[in-house]
Amino acid sequence: MTWQSYLETHQADFQARLLDFLRIPSISSLPEHADDVRSAGAWVMKQLQHAGMEHIDLLETGGHPVVYADWLHAPGQPTVMIYGHFDTQPVDPLELWDSPPFTPVIKDGRVYARGASDDKGNMLAPVLALEALLKSEGRLPINVKCFFEGQEEIGSPTLPAFIAANKARFACDFVLSADGGQWSEDQPALLVGLKGLAALQIDVVGPAYDVHSGLYGGAIQNPIHALAAILASMRSADGRILVEGFYDDVVPLSEVDRAEIARVPYDEESVRQKLGIDAFFGEPGYTTLERSWGRPTLEVNGIWGGFQGEGVKTVLPSEAHAKITCRLVANQRPDKIAALLAEHVAQHTPPGVKVTVSIKENGAMPYLMAGNHPGNAAARDVLVELYGKEPFLARSGGSIPVTAMFLESLGAYTVSFGFGLNDERQHSPNEFFRLENFTRGQQAYCMLLHRLAQ
């Protein structure tokens, strides 16, 4: 039996297993689901055992666990580590789901459930590919390790120290990430860049309590006005970030980078209409896609303070608040950017208020790899064979923190090799995964492991 025939004859069983996986409510952000995250990890271990992988273990990280396995019997061949995650986002708002989020439903060639695309369907595909190869050929073409985590959706907070403390176990030539996707149903892509993240909150405090605006208006500082002035000082009218030193470490887009981005079709007019906006806006000198993929950003995510009810209440508020995130590009560090923002706020705080800047998340390092990396070259060949088209070299404005962790601790780049699509409502109600891509992912991993052995 070939791996191709094994996949073909076992698809019904594979789909049934996927439904079992999706029934586990492994929401990593909610403490009441911590046991469910562990149950999902235990379920993955059983699949790896059935596949024929070795040294299978549930590793404690100080947070949600990591599932590890390996098969290391291909001397002279490269070692790759397959990455994915078995935790999910929360399901709110529940009333917008057409079916219960952890009761998977198959309809029109799609499976609907929380985690279907992000990342359980994508993650299970390479596990089943390993099974097909081991059951049909008795071995793998190359050396393979598996690293499946249960805390991706909360930023993998305990993994930096955990990976650094286990470098020998996780050592590999490069990583294959099943947490990713393709450009469209008929157009492949290789993701070569991800943005990092710095998240902060600004708290502005004035009087000890809300005061009468007739008695004190014009006599003391209004925290909302102070906050507005601070925020306005961070960005120019045309969208350039004015925080001192913000751009110092940015790796600029090369002419080759810009040519690759220009190759990607992007219909600005249809996107504009979909968003319901009059025009795009951003840093001068760059296209919309260049700004989204290759330039850092600073955005106010939320702002509040003072009276919020109906009608009028003539108070001068005692405090005001804002949440800010910065999406970072290659060579920027979230800790440095957070420090620069804190210093900028201190320099631009009006008199009469006290301001606190606090870091709200662990942050994420940006990530950038060469399009001609050997892993990308092999993945490109497989994608051309599967799709009949040259893949785009794409970037993302989002973050996958673990990619930078693998590079920093292991010196290993991560090849994005997932098969989800952006329209599959990841993180939203009615998330789904195309079963055609579930099968395609299995085929692709079998092909890629053989390609890497050549």
Image (tube, rainbow, N blue to C red):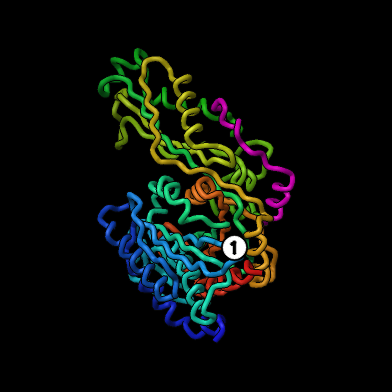
Question: Taking 176 as reference, is 302 left or right?
Answer: left
The answer to whether 188 appears left or right of 65 in the picture is right
Q: Judging from the image, what secondary structure is the residue with disc 1 in?
A: loop
Q: What x and y, as percent, mark residue 77?
A: 60, 65
**The C terminus lies in quadrant:** bottom right
- Establish if 96 lies above or below 18: above
Q: Is residue 170 visible?
A: yes
Q: Is the magenta stretch mostly helix, strand or loop?
A: loop
Tell me which corner region of the image, top left, top right, bottom left or bottom right, holds residue 97.
Answer: bottom left
Q: Mark 1 points at which residue?
A: 78
Res. 384 image quadrant:
bottom right
Q: Is residue 12 left or right of residue 220?
A: right
Quarter of the image with the N terminus is bottom right
Can residue 99 be seen in the rendering of this structure?
A: no
Query: Residue 221's spot in the image, x, y percent?
Result: 37, 17
Tell me the magenta residue range: 241-264
Q: What residue type is labelled 1?
A: Pro
Check the image and report above or below for 221 versus 9: above
> Residue 228, image x and y in percent?
44, 27
Confirm whether the magenta stretch covers residue 254: yes
The vertical placement of 347 against 265, above or below, is: above
User: What residue is drawn where x is 31% and y is 31%?
Assistant: 307
Residue 414 within the segment the image draws in magenta? no
